[in-house]
Amino acid sequence: LTHVSQVVAHGIAALRGRTFQYKVPIRRKLGLTAFLSALTVALMGVIPVQLSTVAPAQIVASQPQVIAAPLGGVIDSILVQPGQQVLAGMPVVQYRSEELEAEVRLAESRVRLASAAFDQASNTGFIDAKVRADLARLQADIDLAQSQAELARERLDLAVILAERDGLAVIDRPEEWTGRPVQPGQRIMQVVDPARLKVSVDLAAENVIPLAPGDEVRVALNDSPLSSLIANIDYIEFE
């Protein structure tokens, strides 16, 4: 009531062009200050305070298909463009296959020669015991030649790399791969699912905030600062 009466008196004085002054006892001011301070501390203990930091971030694919060189050789061409939609089973990389095709022809000719030698020995083995005893070795020659031919055909099949899943092709400057020699296991490109993404954040030591795997975070990117991505911490590594 005292406070209300003071407000009314102040309004009447203002209408009459007079100045109205009132004083608040120091003891009441100190008590109010202490009360507000205690309330602030209590609310800080109840209301969670969100921490934030600024760091370079990059949107990367989650569990992409990494297309690597299955064998040593020379790349003839990349059959897709960056960002192109690809389907499972679709050709994406072509090797130069001239040497592989020559290996297949050579291996198949060895099979024919070994088979001809075996057939000849079989026809004369009835009258020549020595030739008949050599049939086992000739059969082994056929088996070896057939194995080499099968391996050559499998290598030729690898000259065209197929996508294993649907997604988008991710490759940097595909034209520069033409004529480039590669080693087995060398990464060439990726096929990513645009619905499965993650954010890689490089946080400096002085900007580290308490986080643990599984914590929910929000990431605001430069191109859309008013909206944020909701994610969960996958892992944290230190360098």
Image (cartoon, grey):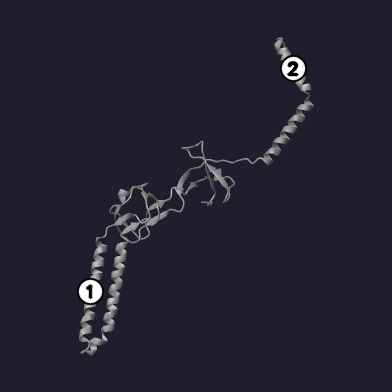
Determine whether label 1 and label 2 are within 8 Å by CB.
no
Question: Is residue 171 among what the camera can see?
Answer: no
Residue 82, how many percent across, how many down? 36, 47
Residue 10, numbered circle: none
Residue 237, horizontal then vertical, whole percent: 52, 52
Q: Quadrant of residue 182?
A: bottom left
Above or below residue 233? Residue 143 is: below
Left/right of residue 231 with respect to residue 18 in the rendered view: left
Residue beneath the point at 51% across and 38% down? 227
Amino acid tagged 1: Arg
Q: Secondary structure at mark 1?
A: helix
Viewer-proximal residue among 220 and 33: 220
Residue at the image point whose x is 31% and y is 62% from the top: 157
Q: Is residue 83 above or below residue 128?
A: above
| Sequence-wise first label, 1 or 2 | 2
Q: What secondary structure is found at the residue carrying circle 2?
A: helix
Residue 223 is situated, as x and y percent measured from the top left of the image, at 46, 37
Comparing 43 with 28, the one in front is 43
Left-right relation of 223 to 83: right
Residue type at mark 2 is Val
The quadrant of the image that shows the N terminus is top right
Whether residue 172 sits left or right of residue 41 in the image: it is left
Q: Residues within 10 Å of mark 1 (few under 14, many from 20)?
A: some
Dividing the picture into quarters, in which one does residue 147 lie?
A: bottom left
Residue 101, located in which quarter of the rendered image?
bottom left
Q: Which residue is mark 1?
A: 112
Is the residue marked by circle 2 packed among few (<14), some (14-19), or many (20+) residues within 10 Å?
A: few
Q: Is residue 235 above or below residue 228?
A: below
Measure how far apart labels 1 and 2 are at the Cα level. 116 Å
In the image, 227 versus 31, the foreground residue is 227
Q: Residue at x 22, y 71 (%)?
A: 109
**Residue carrying label 2:** 8
